[in-house]
Image (spheres, helix red, strand yellow):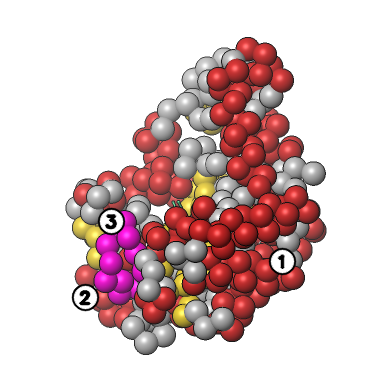
Amino acid sequence: MNTIQMQDREAAGIFARELERQRYKLNLIASENYVSPAVLEAQASIMTNKYAEGYPGARWYHGCEHVDEIEKLALSRAKAIFDAEHVNVQPHSGAQANLAVYYALLEEHDTILAMHINHGGHLTHGTKQNFSGRWYKAVFYGVSIAAETIDMEEVGSIALKSRPKLIVAGASAYPRAIDFKAFREVADEVGAYLVTDIAHIAGLVAAGLHNDPVPYADVVTTTTHKTLRGPRGAMIMCREKYAKAIDRAVFPGVQSGPFMHTIAAKAVAFGEALKPEFRDYQAQILANAGRLAKGFAAERFRLVSGGTDNHLILIDLTGEGITGVEAADILNEAGIIVNKNSIPFDEKPPSVTSGIRIGTPAVTTRGMREKEMDMLVGMVSRVIRNKSDEGIRQEVRREVRNLCEKFPIYP
Ligand code: DSN
């Protein structure tokens, strides 16, 4: 940051304030993480200077010999992590990865079946405000009222009625394991493509700590920056028979120049994911989430589905006399960052919500373990249950800072 500091104090000041925020606030956003210094360096590298439309060995620009090498490295490492037949590491984001997959496999107005956003699905899974809901006919499954988990019999019967051309299995706010094999069976019954969006759980899948979608899905999409702990971006994995269609859909279909600095950072992050300590990290993410679930349940908070199998929990605040947005706001004041989040069958609008989503990938990267999760439960509970008490928030803010000092993001 020294050069920016000398050249542009205004921008440098903003970076410094963001660094301060990241250092001294507790990040419980389930979809965020802290990349390693090596990934950060790769993302800020000279690779940003190169245009490379096309694919390794077949570019529209000259001078691509080294960016070809780095893209090939990212591809071979991604294949090794997930045992995928074909990979495309160019999508700039999860939304663009999903856009490319639909573009490759569907015609306009085809039917897709996916999890409703109010039950944990993602914007790009057919929401009407998104291209996926506007260009395709979206039909939805959700969770059952009783168990608040995906009911595969219901998914099967909706599929039989709606005959989708493509089924999406994956979620942004679902605390339970997803049965990809069962989704494959439904897809086969109705002759649909199965696309799994594993953005949230990719790190767990990579470590063998969640059901593996790769043997069952025609196409798998994921972002690279959540549990996988790479740079912001995405990738697509697919069976060899879809390789050409997927590659053409990404470029020239929906993107032109790939971000070679981001692809370089993906290569470095994938190298980290292949190391044995990455599995330990993922196991600790799970242990921490399980501990939070146990702790909040002991404090008599209601957890959607009663607990978690993955890196996140959803707390239903309906009985607490506070909305999701109010809780997220006062927690932020106390130095704890969570998402407001709809809970299944929520009566409040998505801008308000009755729930909060809490995830462990980022605090686990800081090195926090079960003991710190217990402290977190105490801090979150105190803030939420004393919403009119500014003093409690100040007190927790100090505790958060102390904890953050013990677990630095970049030691
Ligand atoms: N923004 C991601 C999340 O928070 O789950 C989804 O795009």
Q: Tell me the residue that label 1 is attached to.
A: 372
State the separation of the CA atoms marked 2 and 1. 48 Å
Mark 2 is surrounded, within 10 Å at the Cα level, by few (under 14), some (14 to 19) or many (20 or more) other residues, namely: few
Distance from the alpha carbon under mark 3 to that under mark 2: 20 Å
Numbered range of the magenta stretch: 344-354
Q: Nearer the viewer, residue 5 or 48?
A: 5
Residue 40, by quadrant, is top right
Which amino acid type is shown beneath numbered disc 2? Lys
Counting residues from the start of the chain, the first of labels 2 and 1 encountered is: 2
Magenta: predominant secondary structure element? loop
In which quadrant is the N terminus drawn? top right
Kindly indicate the quadrant of the structure image that contains residue 46: top right
Q: Residue 2: x percent and y percent?
A: 71, 20
Q: 203 and 59: which one is in front?
A: 203
| Residue 44 sits above or below residue 149 on the image | above
Q: So how many labels did they put on this image?
A: 3
Query: Which element is circle 2 on?
Result: helix
**Label placed on residue 161:** 2
Q: Residue at x 63, y 31 (%)?
A: 16
As helix, strand or loop, the secondary structure at mark 3 comes to: loop
Residue 395: percent from left, percent from top: 62, 59
Disc 3 designates what residue? 127
Which of the marked residues, 3 or 2, is nearer the chain's N terminus? 3
Q: Badge 3: how crowded within 10 Å, few (<14), some, or many (20+)?
A: many
Answer above or below: position of 355 versus 276: below
Residue occupying the point 48% across, 38% down: 92
Relative to 115, 198 lies left or right: right
- Residue in the image at 59% along x and 84% along y: 298
